[in-house]
Each structure stands twice: as structure tokens, then as C-alpha cells.
Image (tube, grey):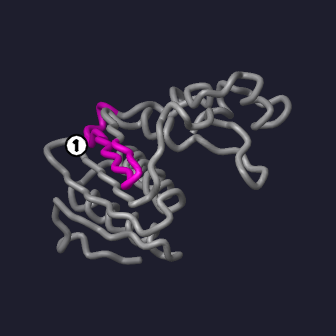
Amino acid sequence: MMVDARTIQTPLTLCVSQSENGLRTARAVLRAVLEARGVDRDRMDDSLLVAGELLANALQHGRSDAVMDLDCVDDELRITVTDPGPGFRLEEIPPAGSLRGGGRFGGFGIPLVKTLCSRVDWKSSEAGTRVEAVVSLNSADAIPCADLKIELLGLSADDAAWLLGEGADLDTAATF
């Protein structure tokens, strides 16, 4: 999807639908905002990943459309995602890498968001959930890929090796 970055300014509020194009459109708008600001590729990738994880969680668990607020101030991007779902408690979330419904592994999104953001605040209740994440847009604050190992996401070395396959070099293969 092509978005004309010259027409997009922050703060900006998007209603993100559960449709097939909802998440893709939100990411395209965010990419245009960041390109217009001249944000480097690594910081853009981090920002898109954070927004994508927060929106995917909201759309999946919120059981409805979500709202994403974007605001670029100085060298920070504030991403706020709100959904009307039943809410959750962080301490009750299964650990990253645990087996989920449908026989798939999951739970990597929240630890990844925490790692990539300078600040993350959750407010959750029966009325819904609001997550505010702040990503530094300063390239000097970027986290080198080699530092984002699977073990930062809560996996043991044995579990990481199992996920990556026998004989995997965890110093190189377990990076993002």
C-alpha cells in the first residue's frame, strides 16, 4: 500500500480493523510517518515490529477492532494501542516459548516489545486494555541484533536449541 508521507503528521489516531488489511494498512501508515521523519532502517524496523506485535495482540485477544495512536516527539515514537477486550494480567501470561492452542509456540511478543522499547506501560481491566510503548528513534540507542538473543525472551539454551534445530549455533542462529 502506498501512503503519501507528506500528508501524514502526528499525533495521529487510526482505527485498525480485524480485516485482512487492517494490520498491513496501520504498518504502512507508520512506515510513511517514520520515512517522512528520516528515521533510519533499524529504528524503523524496531518501531514497525513493536506496533505490529501490539496490534496483533489487540486484534487477536481484544476480539474487536483496535485503536492505535502515534505521536513522534523529539527522538521518540509513542505507540498507544487500545482494545475493548477482556483484559489480562501480565503475571498470568504463560512464559515465552510455551506451547499454545493449536499446537503452536507463542508468547514472544510482550518480551520482545519490552526489549525494544525504552518504556512500556500496560493498563488492563475488564473494560479493555491500553498499552503505551515508547521507541527511541535515535540510531545511537539501537540494540545490536547480536544482543537480541532468544534467551532474552525467556527461553533456556536447551529450549532455544530445540526450536532452532539440532546443532544450531546459539551465538549466531538465535539472533533476530
The span shown in magenta is: 123-141
Q: Residue at x 18, y 74 (%)?
A: 7
Say above or below: 145 vs 58. above
Q: Amino acid at mark 1?
A: Glu
Q: Measuring from the top left, give residue 120's x and y in whole percent.
A: 34, 37
Nearer-the-camera pick, 91 or 170: 91
Nearer-the-camera pick, 112 or 164: 112
Circle 1 sits in a helix, a strand or a loop, which is it? strand
Q: Measuring from the top left, give residue 165's x and y in whole percent.
A: 82, 36
- Asked if residue 111 is among those painted magenta in the image, a careful observer would answer no
> On the rendered structure, is 75 left or right of 101?
left
Q: Residue at x 40, y 44 (%)?
A: 42
Q: Residue furthest right?
A: 166
- Secondary structure, magenta segment, majority class: strand
Q: Residue furthest top?
A: 157
Q: Residue furthest front?
A: 126
Say above or below: 21 vs 109. below
The quarter in which the C terminus is drawn is top right
Q: Which residue is mark 1?
A: 76
The quarter in which the N terminus is drawn is bottom left
- Asked if residue 126 is among those painted magenta in the image, a careful observer would answer yes
Q: Measuring from the top left, give residue 107's x and y in whole percent.
A: 60, 42
Q: Residue at x 44, y 49 (%)?
A: 87
Q: Measuring from the top left, give residue 169's x and y in whole percent.
A: 74, 27
> On the rendered structure, is 12 left or right of 45?
left
Total marks drawn? Answer: 1
Q: Residue at x 19, y 42 (%)?
A: 75
